[in-house]
Each structure stands twice: as C-alpha cells, then as structure tokens.
Amino acid sequence: MEFTIWLSYVTTVLILVITPGPSVLLATANSMKYGSDKAIGTILGDLSANTCQILLASLGLASFVISSAGLFQVIKWC
C-alpha cells in the first residue's frame, strides 16, 4: 500500500473516531437534562446494543440479511 493512501486512510479514521456520533450526543443531552445517574442508563443501553450488533454480525447474520430482503425488514422493525 502506498504511503499516501495509508495516510489518507489514517486521517479519515482519526476524524471519524474523534467526531461524536448520535449515541454520544444523546448521552450528553440526557446527562444535561436528567443528570448523570439517568445518563448511565443511556450509556449502558448503547453499549449493550453495540455488543448485540457485534455478536450478531460475527455470527454471520449479515450474510443472511444480504440474501433475504424479508429478513432484513423484520430485523429493521425489531
């Protein structure tokens, strides 16, 4: 891999990592509105959802979703 391509990749990843996403913004908003005790529930919910997504993806759910549009709709609604 060329150094310029690698440098572009690393720069893009760093920008994405330091940019807060919707989960961070929701936790921040809940913390300001309800206090830090209530925001912990938001953070734990986000972490558990991320863990479930990682586990399902690692078990091969992605290949089933790609092959079946109906299954994708069911998962999306769940």
Image: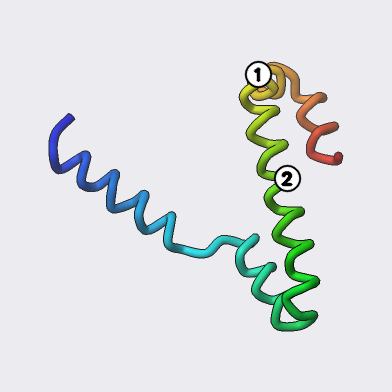
Helix, strand or loop at disc 1?
A: loop
Quadrant in the picture for the C terminus: top right
Question: From the viewer's perspective, is 57 left or right of 40?
Answer: left
Q: Nearer the viewer, residue 36 or 55?
A: 36
- The extreme bottom residue here reads 33
Mark 2 highlights which residue?
A: 49
Vertical placement of 10 versus 27: above or below? above
Cβ–Cβ under 8 Å for marks 2 and 1: no
Name the residue: 85% across, 41% down.
77
Question: From the viewer's perspective, is 66 left or right of 75?
Answer: left
Q: Nearer the viewer, mark 2 or mark 1?
A: 2
- The extreme front residue here reads 37
Residue type (three-letter) at the residue carrying disc 1: Gly
Q: Nearer the viewer, residue 12 or 48?
A: 48
Residue 14: x and y in percent read 35, 54
The crowding category of the residue bearing disc 1, from other C-alpha atoms within 10 Å (few below 14, some 14 to 19, many at least 20), is few
Residue type (three-letter) at the residue carrying disc 2: Ala
Residue 64: x and y in percent read 71, 18
Vertical placement of 13 versus 66: above or below? below
Sequence-wise, the earlier of marks 2 and 1 is 2
Helix, strand or loop at disc 2?
A: helix
Q: How many marks?
A: 2
Residue 48: x and y in percent read 73, 45
Vertical placement of 53 versus 39: above or below? above
Mark 1 highlights which residue?
A: 60
Name the residue: 70% across, 53% down.
46
Name the residue: 70% across, 82% down.
32
| Residue 26 - label | none
Q: Marks 2 and 1, Cα distance to the nearest angstrom?
A: 17 Å
Name the residue: 42% across, 62% down.
18
The picture quadrant where one finds residue 4 is top left
